[in-house]
Image: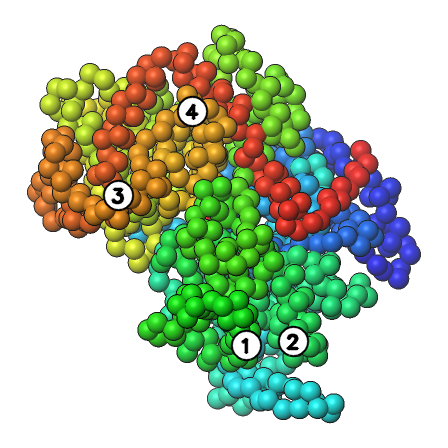
Amino acid sequence: MKTQNKKIESYFSHESLGGIELSKEEIKTAFLEKLFYGIGRIPSVATTNDFYTALALTVRDQVFKRYVRSLEEYAELDSRGIAYLSAEYLPGPHLGNNLLNLEITEETREALAELDIDLEALLEQEVEPGLGNGGLGRLASCYLDSMATLGIPSIGYGIRYEFGIFNQTLKEGWQAEVTDKWLHYGNPWEVVRPEIAFEVRFGGRTEHGKNEDGTLKVTWTPDSEVKGTAYDTPILGYNSNGIVMRLWKAEAIDSFDFSAYNMGDYYRAVEKKMRSENITKVLYPNDENLSGKELRLKQQYFFVCCSLQDIIRLHLMQGRKLNTLSEKFSIQLNDTHPSIAVPELMRLLVDEHDMEWEEAWHVTRHTFAYTNHTLLPEALEKWSVHLLGRLLPRHMEIIYEINRRFLNELREKHYTGEQIARMSIIDERGEQSVRMAHLATVGSFKVNGVSRLHSRLLKSQVLNDFADLWPSQFTNITNGVAHRRFLAVSNPGLAELISEKIGKQWLTDLPQLKGLEKYADDVDFRERWMQVKLQNKIGLARHIKERTGVELDPSMLFDVHVKRIHEYKRQHLKVLHILSLYLRLKNGKGEGISPTAFIFGGKAAPGYFMAKRIIKLITSVAELVNNDKEVQDRLKVVFLPNFSVKQAQRVYPAADLSEQISMAGKEASGTGNMKFALNGALTIGTLDGANVEIREEVGEENFFLFGLNTEEVQTKKASGYHPYRIYDRNEELQEVIDFLISGELENGNTEIFRPVHDNLLQQDPYLLLEDYQSYIEKMEEIHEVWRSPVKWAKMSILNVARMGKFSSDRSIHEYAEEIWKVEPVKVQLSK
Ligand code: 8GP
């Protein structure tokens, strides 16, 4: 905060900004002032949204106070900083989390109650920014939360999509996509920074000439330009610092002067403006083949280009030289989406700042670190050389040069032709394309996977050649979750009970939960524990009734499968299980079945045929089961539409059983698995992703394991897998699979689920049939344990007590220590 104005400077000093505690009276006054002067409303005409906005603005002031202080402190200490580059963020609603971080939830609740306003109703009013698809985007937001709390000087860079992930509705049981309009009522949490804006160029051609001193000079003449403007959302840590999430919005460049054109050109000018703005219009749903999507590549380059220019601006502003960039900044690439940053930084250093290639490459390779989030071959990004070369001609040249030098290095090390072809950044098979994971790996000083198993598979399979070449470059950082949001904010009943027993330190030190272990044998504690769960279930049942009309008895086992819909996550294995129970009940063989409510939620990519059919299958099974009088008090099935962070915060606290049933080797980590267990749900899962480590922590006796492990999956596939043979040998499975095409699910329509049926019998790429029996048997065991409430409660308590490892605070600590080499800077809060 360097200003020449001493009076302003003194206002920013710690003392005059005052303490950070706000009394109920102060909150009330501030709230009313915001209502009058902030949005110009009198209470008699104010809507719930006006109240929400007034409260958000009140809270935002306090958030800014902390944020500004953190900035000051970071600048003064001249500390090393982190830029987190992510094409996706899923922050969830801000209000509740900020109230917790400011520790003013109760004061605010009381202040509003005195004005006859219910805080819960205002929390409900917030529309969350759905700027991500799922796990990867939510992880980025968890990490910003932890970076703020730990005091890591950092900025989260991303894209301010005008339309985020679509809203999901159901039409006759099928998913229908509705445009998300999260900005419709405005966004009180962000501020626009028109002075922080950069130009981004596309297309055109390059010219290779000479500088006066004879060195090579490349000039890029683009054929279009847009401007990226920063929109800042401060992200607060718990009782500590604030950092910023800086999202770029695309606009037409300022120099475009409309008045200089005649009428005809005026419209062309407007069209050009609209074309510019298109870049940040909409988030692409994942799981689709995006390789041909020019606009997607434009988005990636656009936000990377703005972010790097901003980082360089910040670096130079401190009077530093560009060749020290890597000493002052680490840039974390959240998956390959931002990996065009590697050639972009090279371009900026070499072409714009006249650095020698070798020196620029040294800086680049010591600045970037890359996190991989998926092993799925179809999700590994590739861009055709033709498209990339057309849109970013200079970058294509730079990529070729990086690759030429890299392949030379391999040749010097006597690599064979085949190995070289495998490792090349350019894939020469078929249409030439750029392998973005290779580009990110070659351009980074560290590469990490997101769970121990995933990192091992990354090293032994997807990037094995690179791991052999540079073993010390590879590491693992197991994911973690923002436990303050997913326990303290979303499950206040449980949080309170925990704090009563072990104090509040767990809020910033999750391993403290260990202290709960000794209460697992305490009858009174166990009862209160299950009482909290019951209340949460009652709340969720009410919500489900409102949203779907389905009534759930809260005493049932709440068996929950929520996450993106994908075949590898095997929602349809759960469906096979439900059908087996249904048929058992119909055949009078249902004695071992505990009354169960099956709750599903999750979005399917709009173009993913099978995933959408699986949603339809779930809703059809729900129709059948829920309307069959014979099984009514035993089984219920619901599909809760539009799963989001907000929904998730309702669902996790109310779950008894968490379904983590992906085929082993496919789920990089999973983070829902952690959120469930943290809220006292028991897990049924395969040895996949972070399940392995969760089981290790909570103890194998407190985790329901089933199915093949990764090696067994690979052996099975290598030796020739024949799903039909399994079907042929298992009578119950036959009945269940045949049921899919019996017509009973859809008014005599035998064809609707035939694609699922045929896929399972003919290919079954995710081994549902192979794992079926093991799953069914484990579920029988679970139903038996459920009938022993004491045992269940003990297991639930021990699960929570042993989840200390899975806080994103721990993950960020590891990133800071192992990768970024950055020291936390804790801002002193004067109370
Ligand atoms: C997800 C992984 O599927 C999940 O296991 C993991 O917990 C999460 O990332 C956070 O690490 N991966 C993605 O969402 C992903 O790869 N998305 C890209 C394909 C777009």
**Residue pointed to by mark 3:** 716
Compared with 820, 557 (above or below) is above
Q: What element does badge 1 sit on? A: helix
Residue 53 place in picture, x, y as percent = 60, 46
Residue 463 place in picture, x, y as percent = 46, 56
Compared with 348, 60 (above or below) is above
Query: Front-most of 249 and 301?
Result: 301
Q: Are marks 2 and 1 in contact (CB under 8 Å)?
A: yes
Rendered image: mark on residue 357 = 2
Query: Front-most of 798 and 276?
Result: 798
N-term-proximal mark, 2 vs 3: 2
Q: Which amino acid does label 3 sit on?
A: Lys
In the rendered structure, the answer to whether residue 739 lies left or right of residue 213 reads left
Q: What element does badge 4 sit on? A: helix
Residue, x 16% and y 23% (percent of image)? 585
Q: Which of marks 2 and 3 is in front?
A: 3
**Residue pointed to by mark 4:** 700
Q: What residue type is labelled 4?
A: Glu
Q: What element does badge 3 sit on? A: helix
**Residue pointed to by mark 1:** 401
In the rendered structure, the answer to whether residue 121 lies left or right of residue 735 reads right
Query: Front-most of 479 and 646?
Result: 479
Q: Distance between the residues labelled 4 and 1?
A: 51 Å
Q: Distance between the residues labelled 1 and 3?
A: 42 Å
